[in-house]
Amino acid sequence: MKHPAISHVYRLVGLLCLMLCFATSACVNEEEYDDTPQGNLEALWRIIDEHYCFFDYKQHAYGLDWQEVHARYAAQVNDGMSQKQLFEVLCNMLAELRDGHVNLSAPHDFGRYWAWSEDYPSNVSDTLLRRYMGTDYKIAAGIDYCILDDNIGYVRYESFTQGVGEGNLDEALLHMILCRGLIVDIRGNGGGDLTNAEKMAARFCNEKTLVGYRQHKRGTGHSDFSPMEPRYLEPSANIRWQKPVVVLTNRQVFSAANEFTLYMKSLPNVKIVGDQTGGGSGMPFSSSLPCGWTVRFSAVPMYDTERQPTEFGIAPDYRVDLTDDDFRRGRDTLIEFARQLIANN
């Protein structure tokens, strides 16, 4: 008869062997790629093919054919090419997705697609903003704010990477509480922390409000998604703004700032003025290639309240561009339009 301790050891060994078998079988079907130019291209193409979230939408929007893209770029790689040459080919392949959230990171460079803003006017001028804000504007963490000479409040939020506290927002809104309306300028805001965007938008929300939908990838097929889940904006428990609001946008408004625009457009007493936003409505995910380079891509699609993608941006309520004539006169066309809109309201 075995000693109890010995029997226990045997059971542990048996359990470990069983776990090893399961672990081994789980990896059998996973395809591995060599650290070669062809292997890295195949790995990158497969990662995107199985996990990217906008294939159906972009095939419909501009005819994206990911299989055709594979054939075209696979023919451009060979064993004799340098790392930098390979990086260029892979970045060009990813650019076919037309997605600012898709990046390839290597020690020598950062591959990106910025045509969503580069091919459009900026519609914002630091020179003009300094004229409107002066030198005695107030700073509360990530926001700058002041009261314009017609008693309209002005808030500049340049990046949602910069946090702002509830106390900061309370102080800013209290300072402008007697203003006729509020301009929230997010031109040039390329995104950042989504919680900052939600925190800001909650100050203009009085009840739980549907702002859109999301899905999650649940398979490797291009159309393998979970059912759409509603997304809501909850009102802040702190001071909330009740007067007219105008949000200023341009093509550089992207990612979390795109979502902020979506939230604000869902609220009453809010109007969007400027250019269509740059988009970027897919929440990003990261993976790595055999050579160690990192790829980031959109994995969770977001939609508006009509269940339509906002990947290519959100149209303003009023399309307004900064004109050369106004610039020469020291006037910001978008700010002036917003002021008039609030005055008429």
Image (spheres, rainbow, N blue to C red):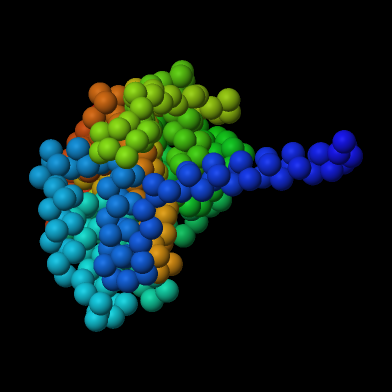
Q: Is residue 15 above or below residue 190?
A: above
Q: Residue furthest top?
A: 207
Quarter holding the C terminus is top left
- When asked about the image quadrant of residue 180, the answer is top left
Between 269 and 311, the one lying in front of the other is 311
Between 109 and 191, the one lying in front of the other is 109
Q: Is residue 22 above or below residue 303?
A: below
Residue 82: where, in percent of width, then height? 28, 80
- Left or right of residue 155, residue 85 in this image: left
Marks counted in the figure total: 0
Q: Residue at position x 46%, y 48% from top?
A: 27
- Left or right of residue 165, residue 44 in this image: left
Residue 156: where, in percent of width, then height? 41, 48
Q: Residue at position x 32%, y 31% from top?
A: 225
Q: Is residue 323 visible?
A: no
Q: Residue at position x 28%, y 60% from top?
A: 42
Residue 90: where, in percent of width, then height? 26, 65
Quarter holding the N terminus is top right
Q: Is residue 102 visible?
A: yes
Between 282 and 92, the one lying in front of the other is 92
- Left or right of residue 198, residue 150 in this image: left
- When asked about the image quadrant of residue 310, the answer is top left
Residue 139: where, in percent of width, then height? 53, 52
Q: Residue furthest front?
A: 1
Q: Residue at position x 14%, y 67% from top?
A: 75
